[in-house]
């Protein structure tokens, strides 16, 4: 019994609240509605992605034209264009009127639209339009034909664009492969250069090639080698042929022998220099760093 009484009291209390809301002042309702709208304004905005359009759509584009341009270059509508526009007004009026199911609303719409169309008919002769405006711009059949022709041109162009995009993508992939190959070749060339430097670092100076050495033909014909006859036989022939030159040849022989004796004294100096250079190179290779060794060998 106690539970039933409690439920009855809660029911009475809820009904009382609903009555208060129903008999609330209209201004209070307006304030509460305004408050709810403000609360909705402060609510987080959720961006909803619109689905992709399946068909081509016209986009709005606004152009600002000065009054001077309109007054100087624009001309009134031709009679044929005015006739086409009136046909558009009648078609729009007919569509709106036929969309009303109630006879009373249909009659009201017909009266209102008749006054609007009449006002627009009076304004047509005074309207100025650009000089490029043609009769076909207000002819639905001709516009449809023109759109079909443009679509027939647009479709192959779009297919060509897609084909070009696929070709560009393929060429970019091939370009990336070529770049990777080029990078690998550069790395291999750098490693080969370092390997050659490390290999030639410990080579004996006697077998090192000069920096400006160019490999070529080194046969006797290329270096213009001339084989001479033995010196003694040539001297004897000269002495026999020219007896008056015997004194001069004796002096030359003495000078030659003196030169040979001097060369014999310095004969071992070249080998000693090469040996010292090799010892110094081995010492630098052992105790100096790679950068110091390269710097000293360049000097």
Image (cartoon, grey):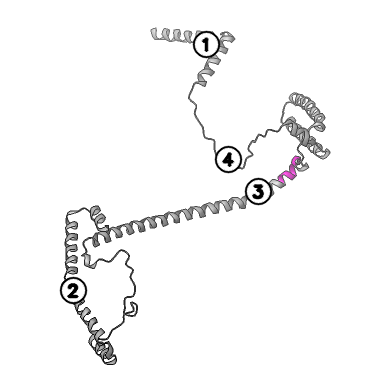
In this rendering, the answer to whether 99 lies above or below 53 is above
Residue holding disc 2: 262
Image quadrant where residue 192 sits: bottom left
Residue neighbourhood size for the residue with mark 2, other residues' Cα within 10 Å, grouped as few (<14), some (14–19), many (≥20): few
- Is tag 2's residue or tag 4's residue first in the polypeptide sequence? 4
- Is tag 4's residue or tag 3's residue first in the polypeptide sequence? 4
Q: Which residues are magenta?
A: 137-144
What x and y, as percent, mark residue 55? 61, 42
Q: Is residue 82 left or right of residue 99?
A: right
- Is tag 3's residue or tag 2's residue first in the polypeptide sequence? 3
Residue holding disc 4: 53
Q: Is residue 59 left or right of residue 92?
A: left
Q: Mark 3–mark 2 contact, CB under 8 Å?
A: no
What x and y, as percent, mark residue 88? 76, 36
Q: Nearer the viewer, residue 262 or 51?
A: 262
Question: Label 3 to label 2, Cα distance in Å?
Answer: 103 Å
């Amino acid at each position: 019994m106690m539970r039933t009484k409690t439920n009855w009291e809660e029911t009475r209390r809820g009904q009382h609240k609903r009555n208060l809301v129903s008999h609330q002042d209209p201004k209070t309702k307006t304030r509460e509605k305004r408050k709810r709208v403000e609360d909705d304004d402060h609510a987080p905005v959720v961006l909803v992605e619109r689905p992709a359009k399946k068909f081509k759509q016209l986009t709005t584009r606004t152009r600002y034209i000065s009054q001077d341009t309109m007054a100087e270059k624009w001309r009134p509508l031709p009679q044929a264009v005015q006739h086409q526009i009136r046909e558009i007004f009648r078609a729009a009026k007919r569509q709106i009127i036929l969309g009303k199911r109630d006879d009373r609303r249909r009659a009201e719409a017909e009266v209102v639209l008749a006054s609007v169309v009449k006002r627009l008919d009076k304004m047509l002769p005074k309207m100025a339009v650009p000089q490029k405006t043609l009769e076909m711009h207000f002819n639905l059949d001709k516009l449809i034909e023109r759109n079909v022709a443009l679509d027939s041109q647009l479709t192959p162009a779009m297919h060509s664009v897609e084909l070009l995009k696929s070709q560009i993508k393929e060429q970019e992939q091939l370009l990336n492969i070529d770049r990777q190959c080029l990078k690998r070749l550069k790395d291999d060339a750098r490693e080969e250069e370092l390997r050659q430097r490390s290999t030639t670092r410990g080579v004996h100076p006697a077998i090192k090639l000069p920096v400006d050495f160019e490999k070529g033909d080194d046969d006797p014909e290329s270096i213009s080698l001339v084989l001479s006859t033995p010196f003694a036989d040539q001297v004897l022939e000269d002495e026999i042929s020219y007896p008056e030159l015997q004194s001069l040849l004796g002096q030359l022989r003495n000078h030659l022998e003196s030169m040979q004796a001097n060369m014999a004294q310095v004969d071992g100096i070249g080998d000693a220099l090469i040996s010292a250079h090799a010892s110094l190179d081995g010492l630098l290779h052992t105790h100096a760093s790679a950068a110091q060794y390269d710097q000293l060998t360049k000097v």
